[in-house]
Image (cartoon, rainbow, N blue to C red):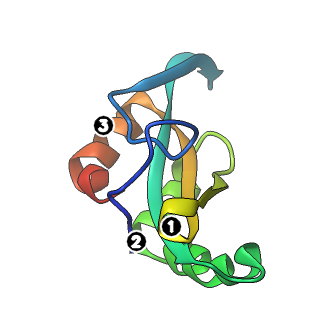
């Protein structure tokens, strides 16, 4: 379901490394917060891509990774949609913000599948 043909611009680009957005104080401890694309998928040319994206988004959210991300993301994960004219469709990405230790765990367990 995840696409590996991601453009080199915008929210859907393949990460070159760690995106260090900010530091955040959580329970009196300072944490590095990493912005991570945790899941990608593509969709063909449809009339209402947001409506058709609901099923794969819910499937991801109910997966082991999705549940884990929903529990541990510092802020609620968001999804982005971009037109993919070279594929005659759309590309979607789910973005989350993880603390350093959670980011390390995610990379070790699911990083190559995001």
3 relative to 54 in the view: left or right: left
Residue at the location (35% across, 56% down)?
A: 5
Which of 51 and 39 lies nearest the eye of the viewer?
51
Residue 44: percent from the left, percent from the top? 55, 79
Total number of numbered labels?
A: 3
In three-dimensional space, the C-alpha distance between marks 2 and 1, rounded to whole angstroms, equals: 5 Å
Q: In which quarter of the image is the N terminus?
A: bottom left
Residue at the location (33% across, 28% down)?
A: 17
The earlier-in-sequence mark between 1 and 3 is: 1
Do we see residue 28 in this rendering?
no
Q: Do the residues labelled 2 and 1 touch (CB within 8 Å)?
A: yes
Q: Could you say whether the residue bearing mark 2 is in a helix, strand or loop?
A: helix
Say the numbered circle drawn on residue 67. Answer: 1
Location of mark 3 (residue): 104
Q: Could you say whether the residue bearing mark 3 is in a helix, strand or loop?
A: helix
Which of 10 and 33 lies nearest the eye of the viewer?
10
In three-dimensional space, the C-alpha distance between marks 1 and 3, rounded to whole angstroms, equals: 17 Å
Classify 94 as above or below 60. Answer: above
Do we see residue 111 in this rendering?
yes
Classify 62 as above or below 7. Answer: below
Q: Could you say whether the residue bearing mark 1 is in a helix, strand or loop?
A: helix
Residue 23: percent from the left, percent from the top? 57, 16
Count residues near mark 2 (Cα–Cα under 10 Å), then give few for <14, some for 14-19, many for 20+. Answer: few
Say the numbered circle drawn on residue 64. Answer: 2
Residue 34: percent from the left, percent from the top? 48, 30
The earlier-in-sequence mark between 3 and 2 is: 2
Say the numbered circle drawn on residue 42. Answer: none
The image quarter in which residue 8 lies: top left
Residue at the location (50% across, 67% down)?
A: 67
50 relative to 84 in the view: left or right: right
Count residues near mark 1 (Cα–Cα under 10 Å), then give few for <14, some for 14-19, many for 20+. Answer: few
Residue at the location (62% across, 20% down)?
A: 24
């Amino acid at each position: 379901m995840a696409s590996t043909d991601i453009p080199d611009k915008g929210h859907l680009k393949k990460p070159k490394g760690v995106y260090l957005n900010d530091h955040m104080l959580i329970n009196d401890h300072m944490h590095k917060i990493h912005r991570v694309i945790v899941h990608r998928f593509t969709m063909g040319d449809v009339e209402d891509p947001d409506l058709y994206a609901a099923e794969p988004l819910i499937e991801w959210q109910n997966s082991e990774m999705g549940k884990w991300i929903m529990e541990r993301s510092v802020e609620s994960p968001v999804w982005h949609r971009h037109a993919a004219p070279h594929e005659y469709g759309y590309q979607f990405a789910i973005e989350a913000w993880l603390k350093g230790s959670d980011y390390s765990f995610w990379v070790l367990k699911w990083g190559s599948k995001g």
